[in-house]
Amino acid sequence: MPTPDTSNQGPPKGLGPLAKREMRFAYVLLLPTFLIVLSVVLFPLIANVWISFKPVTLGDLRAPAILVNERLMGDLEAVGDKADIRYRARNSSRKSAIADVLFTDTIPESLTVISVDDRCVADGQNLSCDLGDYEAGQREDIIVRVAATQAFLDAPENVKDTDPAFTFEPENILTNGDFTLDNFRRVFNASDFWPVLWASMYYTIAGTIGALVMGLFAAQLMNITFGGRAFLRGLFLSPYVAPVIAVALAWVLLLDPGPGGTLNALLIQLGVIEGPISFLGQRAVEINVLGLSFDFPVALTVVIIFEIWRYFPLAMLFILARMQSVSTDIYEAAEIDGATPLQQFRFISLPQLMGIMAVLFLLRFIWTFNKFDDIFLLTGGAAGTRTLTVNVYEQAFAVSNLGAGAAVAVVVFLVLLFFSVIFFKFSPEDDA
Amino acid sequence: MSRFGNIFYLSVLFGALWGAVWVIIITLLALFISGLTFQPQVTAGALAGLIAAALLVFHPPAKRTLGMPALAGFAFLLVLVLASGTQPMGLPLGSYSVGQLVFTVLMAVVTVQSIHLTCMNLGPGREKRYNVEVLCLRFIKGFGLVAFTIAVALPFFVMVMMSLKNQQLLLSNPLDFSIDLGQGFAALFRSYIELFTQYHFGTYLLNSALVSVATVAITLFFAVPGAYAVARLRFPGQNFLSRSILLIYMVPMIVLVIPLYAIFSQLGMRNTLWGLLFVYPATTIPVALYMLQGYFRGIPAELEEAGLMDGLTRLNVIRKITLPLALPALASVALYVFMIAWNEFLFAFMFLDNVDLFTLSRGIAELNSSEVPRQHLMAGAVIATVPVLALFLWFERFLVAGLTAGSVKG
């Protein structure tokens, strides 16, 4: 009696046909997302690193082209008179070469082609020239000698009526082989690199903690029932929901130091200050405390206050949701045990909220570090508020050096990566 | 045990603070509304609040009749008027009399009510730590509510009011937000009318709406199947994917701007709405996918299995069972994505050069120059804010639930 083969019993290994189908289906569903994220996020990330090593300025993005000026040189007054058609061709770019330039044009029927440039061939009225490679900024003339016919004298035609056409392969400044470390040298050697980094860190840390603390406070306020609470909650959320440009410009006008600035006029009216303060234009003010004097960064602090104002609602929302999910039994028990309100907050609420606060800190820290619009719209990076992200814009689009901007962006990304690694190493697993 | 203990003294202190706070706030409100140079009489207000609180808390809670607040209110008015030298708002009572009367009475009512809410059910005698904390926390919370409300509302208030004024008036008296309703509708909303007739704001509004709605549609179209796959189907890399989706959301936009600007410039896609419709969904799909997969996991799998048993295909299961059940989540994700797209500034600012293609954010940035008067700028800000804020407040419940449930689980 044959013994049954037991070698392939036990749980099946690998994926069964059903599981494989499920897997394929899942991949199909995820593919579009993957492709779009790949093309708009991951590929640009890599492209950014690539650009940071290239000497590219904003002007180089306009693809180089051959510009041509066509002109009839000489007078054609009788049949057989000879003249030159001169094409003056020029590489529009002063930096990059253009390879394999082919040139075609149609000579008017009424002119007879006599001789053409060495590089050209005339097939009837059709002219075609192989001009080879054009160096950056190179210009040259192509001469075609023609003779007039009676038809031309009867109805003179303008040689410019037919547009000359070019086919060529411009050297793409983004894909050629020029690499340089100048961008990074420029970024790290700039006298303001460390102040920028410091401003970035100050902005990120103070903005994150401020928004969290204010969110926690606001959540405590919203957790009590009173008439109009729904309305107030809506109001409190509006800084976060409104378009950044609208609220940022409202703040700019509110804080305006010139005539028409509401807050300065208000403070002067109240007798708090004597003259207007340039909240967004003043780098620092010296403060004396107990004989110690230090510079207090004014504009940077105002920008941080804006950040707190705009993002405390988010923290409030999450903390409130967490607070409302805590069962009331535990508070009732504490109440019976005689715990005071502050003790209840300190020993019951706060420990329960620690998890969500940690997650919020992590997320807000990264998002605040990434923040660009707010500072850009408030100060444009002036008066000591230039953070790394504003510096990216400044280098790439204000100074027009795309390469240097990309180099700063690489620094931004590296700093971010550094913090992410630290956070994910030290954050508890089950929180996020 | 003496009749007056710590609660009484604290109440009197808070009464003084409430008096000072409300005198400042209401005087400033009167100043904004009337345009007159009122001065808050802080010391008089504090004194009046102190007296009012002393009267209110004089009796134990059980003996406090309805007459007490009225008495405290009158005392507040009397002290305020006398202590300020019959100028409760810093100007002689003769000018703007009716207004002064209304605002001063308002001060009294609000202050007494605040003191009442703070000291409710707490007697004048000495009490234990528990009640002392209750009293202090009531004041701190009340004060916090007032402070938060003002801090949040002030920029929006200024935004709306400035849009209704004109530059000369604003420069001559920046605190005068009085609105002359007699000038008629067209004159009052002149800035808005000019924005729509001369500054193409109709086009901007249309472009913004188009881009936002299209972004929502594209995002949902891609995120729903993706979220379903991550939440329900088993495949290698599932865990890795569900965790790393949010990492995409951490990538700073500013890092993407330079390469996208360079590449889109060369492809001729930069100055087009298509370019934006390519970039926006890419930034919203990951977070939408993350929020939706959290919700999909919460739907009982048995429902879908029943559908499969009855012969539905997977796609039909998604269409006929999962999606209808996930409608609230879809609504909140849609709203959130709409908000992101509507408010987006950086890419609109970098990509669009052509006035016909401007979104609202880009259009307002264009107004931000010294040649355009301020009321136009603020009117533009109001036009951009109102639709998204209205939509948000209308569906607030959805959004709050979706945001908190999906993004970070409790």
Image: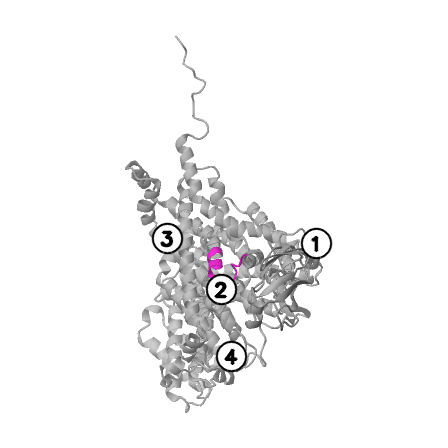
Density class for disc 1 (Cα within 10 Å; few <14, some 14-19, many ≥20) is some
Disc nearest the viewer among 3 and 4: 3
Disc nearest the viewer among 3 and 1: 1
Could you tell me how far apart the alpha carbons at marks 1 and 4 are, in whole angstroms? 52 Å
Q: How many marks?
A: 4
Q: Are marks 3 and 1 in contact (CB under 8 Å)?
A: no
Disc nearest the viewer among 4 and 2: 2
Q: Over which residues does the magenta segment extend?
A: B267-278
Density class for disc 3 (Cα within 10 Å; few <14, some 14-19, many ≥20) is many
Instruction: Give me the residue at 48% from left, 46% from top.
Output: A34
What x and y, as percent, mark residue B242?
A: 47, 44
Q: Which residue is mark 2?
A: A310
Quadrant of the rendered structure where residue A11 is?
Answer: top left
Residue B362 in view here: yes
Could you tell me how far apart the alpha carbons at marks 3 and 1 are, in whole angstroms? 48 Å
Disc nearest the viewer among 2 and 3: 3
Density class for disc 4 (Cα within 10 Å; few <14, some 14-19, many ≥20) is some
Residue A181 is marked as 1
The answer to whether B298 is drawn above or below residue A233 in the figure is above
What x and y, as percent, mark residue B391?
A: 37, 63
Residue A336 in view here: no
Quadrant of the rendered structure where residue B337 is?
Answer: bottom left
Say whether disc 1 or disc 4 marks the residue closer to the N-terminus: 1
Q: Which residue is mark 3?
A: B330
What amino acid type should be assigned to the residue bearing mark 4?
Leu
Q: Which residue is mark 4?
A: A266
Q: Nearer the viewer, residue A2 or A152?
A: A152
Say whether disc 1 or disc 2 marks the residue closer to the N-terminus: 1
Q: Is residue B269 magenta?
A: yes
Q: SS for tag 3?
A: helix
